[in-house]
Amino acid sequence: MADDLQYMDSNIIDFSLLSSPSPTVAASELSKLMEYITNWVYFRQGKLCMHITNIGLSIEFLDKVLDLSKHFFTLPFEEKKKFSRSPDNPRGFAVDGDPENPSEACNRLFLLKKRPERWPQAPQEFSLHCESTTADSGAMTFLLIDREVEALEVLKEDQWFKVPIIPHAIVVLVDDQIEIMSNGIVKSVEHRVKPNLEKVRISTALFHSPNVEKEVGSLKALVTEGRPPLYKTVKSYINLFDDHFPINDTMVP
């Protein structure tokens, strides 16, 4: 990952204006949002990534989310285990308890044994383990990224761009299932994270997905004679995605 990448355009939407009591103000911000979507769809191969500001959560709250998240990962392992996943609660702390691929598990253990403070001594070797890319399996991803350490990069027209840090803004990425539902008009965003060998980085993510039992396909309104369905209707997409993700394969064209 090169350090001389350009920044992507800062497409910023003020969420508070979208719900403004003033019809004029709300319409103006909505028009701005539609302009961003239209520009990305028709002139930039449909890959949509933007920042949303003023989402209704205070700056103090957003700062606390990142600070507590960072603090959590400094806790001893036994403390973190208290917040482990369970059959009744799939959300929580987790580690690979019974890896199906012993070789890959050994590679991970090897990296952990080297410890973060030693990675700068072999940055190229470390980068080989951090440059895999993905487009997420859900509908949309909402990211509260680190306030100081740049890491997120997005792919557009076969070129990588850095995502700028806008403090307290939410980065929105379109994922695979929106691509399917839009019949390919909007493309899921392929992205990656650049490793930082000197600074600690923390981000939080919210993944929004349709019900796993629901079938997902192209919306009828977006299917025409000139643009037939480009994707098969799928169910339990997340499971199909998980089968392909380990080999860095894509589930959508």
Image: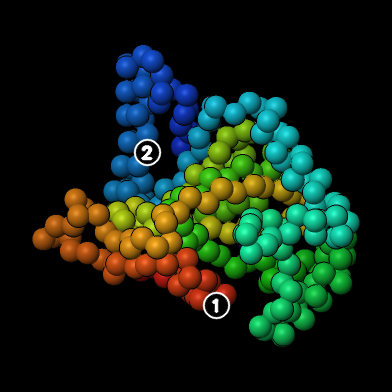
Q: What residue do we see at 73% from left, 67% from top?
A: 95
Point out the tag, 1 or 2, that comes first from the N-terminus: 2
Q: How many C-alpha atoms fall within 10 Å of the one at disc 2: few (<14), some, or many (≥20)?
A: some
Badge 1 marks a residue whose secondary structure is helix
- The quarter of the image holding the N terminus is bottom right
- The quarter of the image holding the C terminus is bottom left
| Residue 73 shows up from this direction | yes
Give left or right: position of 12 versus 80.
left
Give left or right: position of 108 versus 91.
right
Question: Of the residues tagged 1 and 2, which is closer to the observer?
Answer: 1
Report x, y in % for residue 82. 80, 56
Q: What residue do we see at 31% from left, 42% from top?
A: 38
Image vertical order of residue 162 relative to residue 51, above or below: below
Residue lying farthest front?
Answer: 88
Report x, y in % for residue 90. 62, 59
Report x, y in % for residue 23. 32, 17
- Residue underneath mark 2: 36
Q: How many marks?
A: 2
Residue lying farthest left?
Answer: 225
| Residue 159 shows up from this direction | no
- Residue kind at label 2, given as amino acid type: Tyr
* Relative depth, front residue between 112 and 218: 218
Badge 2 marks a residue whose secondary structure is helix
* Relative depth, front residue between 252 and 217: 217
Q: What residue do we see at 64% from left, 44% from top?
A: 145
Label drawn at residue 194: none
* Relative depth, front residue between 215 and 60: 215
Label drawn at residue 247: 1
Report x, y in % for residue 34. 32, 36
